[in-house]
Image (cartoon, coloured by chain):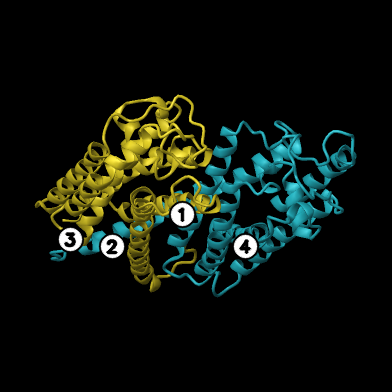
Chain colours: A cyan, B yellow
């Protein structure tokens, strides 16, 4: 339901804003690109030929499809059949993260030098997103490093987390903790560096680019990881307490 | 033994290099500071009046004292008496981390704007360290953000980790995992951003400033956290497996 609502919300926004924005971009005489700060130099920049609607529809329909697919998979008898509804939602989240980190952010960390001039679909997605944070079209050093680690580490580890919950592997909460803390730290640094830069890489306060792309989309990777870190903390401390209690009565000269 | 050897190694290096370096700084006519790149502008820079030997002696004697104190504490009957030698060393490490993150890096994130001109002892320590990485005297954005999170989060959490092992709290391995992953991610980003900057903030290949300050000191926060993440992974997966095994025979319609 959330995904459907999100897609609808975005398509509505597109209808309202896309025409205006496309015209803004198409040469009012000031800058040759739609990014901030307005005097930023982006050599070789080519404007997108895909619409915002196409790009957002792709992102939200693939994410939504993965979410629904994982929901169905985790509800089946067998591997996932024993999972609670909240746990199934968490597994869906990691499936979507596997796609976004591995594919979307993976594309960025492979092709960031040529994204401004490239018309590949995912390059256009990054040019669209960069209206909310131009660090992605200028290959900002921290952004490239953080995205590379996200794509290389949290992408594959997100998929591993999905499998770990599906097959009930004993490392499942450790994986959840590692991925969530990695995402949280990356997102906090992402906001913190831009805060100290005075939000100069976006049109501060713009409803779609600043609030939705930059603030809302990235806040997801603060709020949800915090919940999942807390969940892993409780779970892992509880099983440690169980193990400590089980061994407390025994004679153990050297314990951990 | 390691600490004693390290202190000795440094004092030897000091005798060899301090005179040469101090003379280099004292106005050969090129730059008014000892940092790289040589054309860096550092307004208000005041050269240290404390010697390298004083600064390194402070750092290594406080760290060594904390290490020895924690070693003795964890060997006593009572709270720490049940810990293995390897575990006691890990607890010593977190005690040293609590000091370095909380005090040394805490100072940096509070006073970084005035460090180049300040003669406070810890400001002088940071000016000395900056010979290996000048990002600390120019308040590089990523460096300030990463150090602030390190001081605010990994500092207090390191102390909490020490207490958790001393008192055998069930969250001890979760804390170890969180602190170690946070340190590892910070250190990897720290090296990665500088690598992409072409090691421009140090005299590449300098035995003391580049290899010891920049590479060796920071590599500690890659190697040791990796070992401790691996240790937490094994421990937490084992207690989870124990708990899963204990409940596997029972009828549980909804498990985690």
Of badges 1 and 3, the one in the foreground is: 1
Of badges 2 and 1, the one in the foreground is: 1
Q: Label 1's element?
A: helix
**Residue at coordinates 34% horizontally, 41% vertically from top-left?**
B101
Q: Nearer the viewer, residue B3 or B21?
A: B21
Q: Position of residue B146 (x, y in %)?
A: 46, 42
Q: CA distance from mark 2 to mark 1?
A: 34 Å
Q: Position of residue A11 (x, y in %)?
A: 82, 47
Disc 4 target residue = A102
Q: Label 2's element?
A: helix
Which mark sits nearer the N-terminus, 2 or 4? 4
**Residue at coordinates 41% horizontally, 54% vertically from top-left?**
B205
Q: Label 3's element?
A: helix
Q: Label 4's element?
A: helix
Please tell me how many numbered marks the rendered image carries.
4
Q: CA distance from mark 1 to mark 4?
A: 19 Å
Instruction: Report whether residue B126 is seen.
Output: yes
Of badges 2 and 4, the one in the foreground is: 4
**Which numbered disc covers residue B85?**
3
Disc 2 target residue = A243
**Residue at coordinates 65% horizontally, 39% vertically from top-left?**
A215
Check disc 1: other Cα within 10 Å, few if <14, some if 14-19, many if 20+.
Answer: some
Disc 1 target residue = B188
Q: Is residue A81 left or right of residue B252?
A: right
Instruction: Report whether residue B111 is seen.
Output: no
The chain carrying label 1 is: B
Q: Position of residue A192 (x, y in %)?
A: 54, 38
């Amino acid at each position: 339901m959330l995904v459907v609502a999100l897609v609808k919300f975005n398509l509505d926004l597109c209808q309202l804003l896309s025409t205006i924005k496309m015209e803004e971009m198409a040469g009012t005489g000031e800058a040759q690109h739609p990014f901030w700060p307005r005097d930023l130099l982006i050599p070789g920049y080519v404007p997108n030929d895909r619409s915002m609607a196409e790009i957002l529809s792709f992102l939200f329909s693939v994410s939504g499809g993965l979410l629904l697919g994982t929901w169905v998979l985790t509800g089946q008898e067998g591997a996932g059949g024993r999972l609670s509804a909240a746990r199934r939602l968490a597994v869906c989240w990691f499936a979507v993260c596997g796609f976004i980190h591995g594919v979307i952010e993976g594309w960025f960390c492979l092709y960031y030098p040529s994204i401004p001039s490239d018309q590949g679909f995912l390059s256009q997605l990054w040019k669209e997103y960069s209206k909310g944070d131009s660090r992605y079209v200028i290959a900002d050093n921290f952004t490239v490093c953080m995205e590379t680690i996200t794509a290389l580490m949290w992408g594959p580890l997100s998929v591993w987390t999905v499998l770990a919950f599906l097959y009930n592997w004993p490392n499942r909460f450790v994986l959840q903790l590692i991925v969530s803390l990695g995402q949280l730290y990356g997102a906090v640094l992402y906001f913190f560096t831009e805060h100290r830069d005075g939000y100069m890489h976006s049109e501060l306060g713009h409803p779609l680019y600043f609030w939705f792309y930059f603030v809302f989309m990235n806040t997801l990777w603060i709020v949800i990881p915090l919940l999942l870190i807390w969940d892993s903390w409780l779970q892992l401390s509880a099983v440690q307490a169980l193990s400590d209690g089980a061994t407390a009565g025994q004679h153990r000269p050297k314990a951990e």
